Amino acid sequence: GQNPVLSYVRKLDLSAAVNMLTTAAFIVLVDGIAVDEVSAVGMDYAESEWTERADIDLARFAGRTVTLTLEVSANANVCLEVFAKAWVGGVRVREIAAADAR
């Protein structure tokens, strides 16, 4: 269809509080283009409950087959632990009515 949207649920645990140069991230990519992301720079970020992400606009990818990638990453500039963990479920792509499209 012409108005596809992505929905999913997630729980994240991003740990990058070592210093201001450490990072942790969770990124949702469609054909290598970020459509949803969370990053922590010099801090920790955690979702203790399931977080629903709904109606992420995928119209620019309409009418073709795409590759969906869920990426977690963590980087440190020193020898101290940083990490990124993600739990994901309920991944769904659906068509929305043109009147509901954003």
Image (cartoon, rainbow, N blue to C red):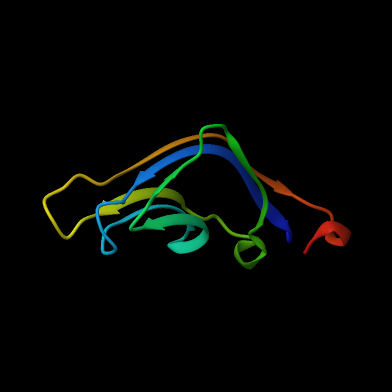
Residue at far right of view = 99
Q: In which quarter of the image is the N terminus?
A: bottom right
Residue at far left of view = 79
Residue at far bottom of view = 60
Q: Which of 39 and 36 is in front in this view?
A: 39
Visible residue check, residue 91: no
**Left or right for 67, reference 53:** left
Position of 83 relative to 63 (above/below): above
Q: Residue at x 17, y 60 (%)?
A: 77
Position of 19 relative to 13 (above/below): below
Q: What is the x, y in percent for residue 54?
A: 67, 47
**Left or right for 48, reference 42:** right
Q: Residue at x 51, y 55 (%)?
A: 66
Q: What is the x, y in percent for residue 96?
A: 79, 52
Q: What is the x, y in percent for residue 30?
A: 50, 58
Q: Which of 61 and 33 is in front in this view?
A: 33
Q: Which residue is drawn at 84% across and 57% down?
A: 100
Q: Quadrant of residue 87?
A: top left
Position of 64 relative to 8 (above/below): below
Q: Residue at x 77, y 64 (%)?
A: 102
**Left or right for 90, reference 14:** right
Visible residue check, residue 58: yes
Q: Which of 60 and 81 is in front in this view?
A: 81
Q: Quadrant of residue 46?
A: top left
Q: Nearer the viewer, residue 95 or 72?
A: 72
Q: What is the x, y in percent for residue 90?
A: 59, 33
